[in-house]
Amino acid sequence: METNRSEFQVAKMAEVLKVSRSDFYAYLARPVSDRQQENEILLEKIKEIHQKSKATYGYPRIADDFKDQATISPTSSKNRVYRLMRKAGIRAKTVKRYKVITNSRHDLPVAENLLNRKFTADKPNQKWVLDITYIWTDEG
C-alpha cells in the first residue's frame, strides 16, 4: 500500500469508483494475481521473440513459437498472445510484396518508343503522354 496518498485522494478515488474506502485500501494491498504475473512473463517473452524477428512476427507466428517451446505456459493461445500484444502496442511490420505487372515474354506487337524519355518540348502540343494502366482489359 502506498503511503504518499492523502486521505482526500483516497476518499475521492473511492467515490469516483463507487466503492467504500476500506474496499479501495483492500484493493491497493491485494497482491498481483497469478494470471497477471503469468501475463507479464508471457509479454516479456513476446517482446523478445518480436525483437528477434526484427518486428516481422505477428501473433500467429509468436503463438506457434510458444507451442514449439515446452517451457512456455500451455495456456498461451493465439487469442491470449493477440490480446497481450494489442494491449502493449506490439505490431508486426507488414511488407508489401513486389508484384510483377509486366509480361515481356510475348509475341504481341510493341509500340515504338518515340520519346526516348525526352519529355521536354519547345512548343505546346508537340508531345503528349498518357497513362492508361488504370483501364481494365480482358487480360486484366
Image (cartoon, rainbow, N blue to C red):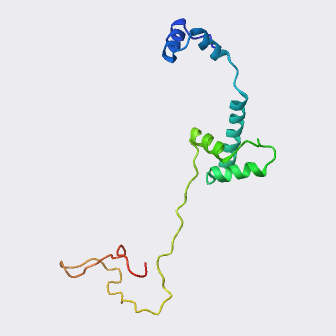
Question: Based on the displayed image, in which of its 4 quarters is residue 86 positioned?
Answer: top right
Q: Is residue 44 visible?
A: yes
| x, y percent for residue 57 | 64, 53
Where residue 66 appears, x then y in whole percent?
Answer: 74, 48
Q: Residue at x 55, y 14 (%)?
A: 19
| Image quarter in which the N terminus is found | top right
State whether residue 38 is above or below residue 138: above
The relative height of residue 102 versus residue 6 in the rendered view (above or below) is below
Q: Is residue 85 left or right of residue 77?
A: left
- Residue closest to the far right: 70
Given residues 116 and 5, the one toward you in this image is 5
The quadrant of the rendering that contains the C terminus is: bottom left
Residue 77 picture location, percent across and down: 69, 45
Q: Is residue 117 left or right of residue 47?
A: left
Q: Position of residue 32 (x, y in %)?
A: 69, 24
Residue 28 vertical position relative to residue 122 in the rendered view, above or below = above
Q: Nearer the viewer, residue 98 or 127?
A: 98
Residue in the picture at 71% in, 52% down: 64
Q: Is residue 53 visible?
A: no
- Point 70% across, 39% down: residue: 42
**Residue occupying the point 61% across, 9% down:** 22
